[in-house]
Image: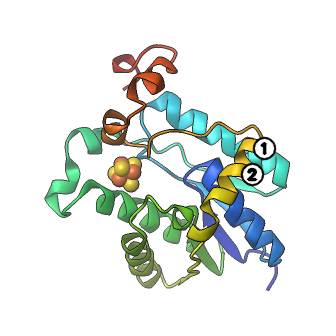
Amino acid sequence: MSGKDLLLHACCAPCAEYPVFDLMERKIGTEVLYFNPNIHPKFEFERRGEQLVKLSEIDKFECHFSDDFRIDDWLAHKWEESYSSRCLMCYDIRMDYVAKYAKEAGFQRFSTTLLVSPYQNHEAIVASSERAAKKYGIEFMYNDWRPHFREGQNMAREHGLYRQKYCGCIFSLEESDFREKIVSSFPDGWEEQR
Ligand code: SF4
């Protein structure tokens, strides 16, 4: 298959390292999409996007970006309307958009770097992806990259990429053991960044 084969959703550059490497090894034509309205605050949202640009220049892949940023959904606990947890809403928001974007842009299939993380709810990500694939009539390409998570993180270290210490939303930041260190890395503090 050539041309617009696979659209790979990237949650961040370090998590994209191994999946991109693997897909290139398998000669699967891949373009990458950064769509992560769950990443807060705005400084962090932009910082992770910039790291993906850096990786795209190293690995030479085409990158698509969305500037959708939805802190209000999280601050308003919007998931409580229809989900048992914020992460289920988070996966659905992202996979729905990615599947729709991939279909409209003419890709054959889509996947996500979320599948590399042993810290994410793998089964819920797969379920969200399959729902979105069915909704938009596009194939979801499943890959269990979790055994290679550390390998990917080491690749990111070698490339000098920023490796964040929280998942992305404001709640995961507040829950992080590294909260103080993270907040101190924001140029204007935390409250001002919202
Ligand atoms: S912890 Fe991560 S997956 Fe869960 S809602 Fe926050 S950003 Fe999304």
Q: Which residue lies under the disc numbered 2? A: 155
User: Which quarter of the image is occupied by the N terminus?
Assistant: bottom right
Left or right of residue 76, residue 178 in this image? right
* Amino acid type for the residue under numbered disc 2: Met
Residue in view at x 68 percent, y 57 percent: 152
Coordinates of residue 30 in the picture (x, y in percent): 74, 69
Q: Please give the count of numbered marks on the rendered protein.
A: 2
Farthest left residue in view: 81
Left or right of residue 104, residue 30 in this image? right
Q: Could you tell me if the residues under marks 1 and 2 are in contact, i.e. CB atoms within 8 Å?
A: yes
As drawn, 169 above or below 29: above
Coordinates of residue 117 in the picture (x, y in percent): 52, 61
Judged from the image, the secondary structure of the residue bearing numbered disc 2 is helix
Left or right of residue 34, residue 68 in this image? left
Q: Which mark is residue 54?
A: none
Coordinates of residue 174 in the picture (x, y in percent): 31, 33
Asked if the residue at label 1 sits under 8 Å from ligand 1, the reply is no
Residue in view at x 74 percent, y 51 percent: 155
As drawn, 50 above or below 20: above
Q: Which residue lies under the disc numbered 1? A: 158
User: Which quarter of the image is occupied by the C terminus?
Assistant: top left
Judged from the image, the secondary structure of the residue bearing numbered disc 1 is helix
Quarter of the figure with residue 24:
bottom right
Coordinates of residue 79 in the picture (x, y in percent): 22, 55
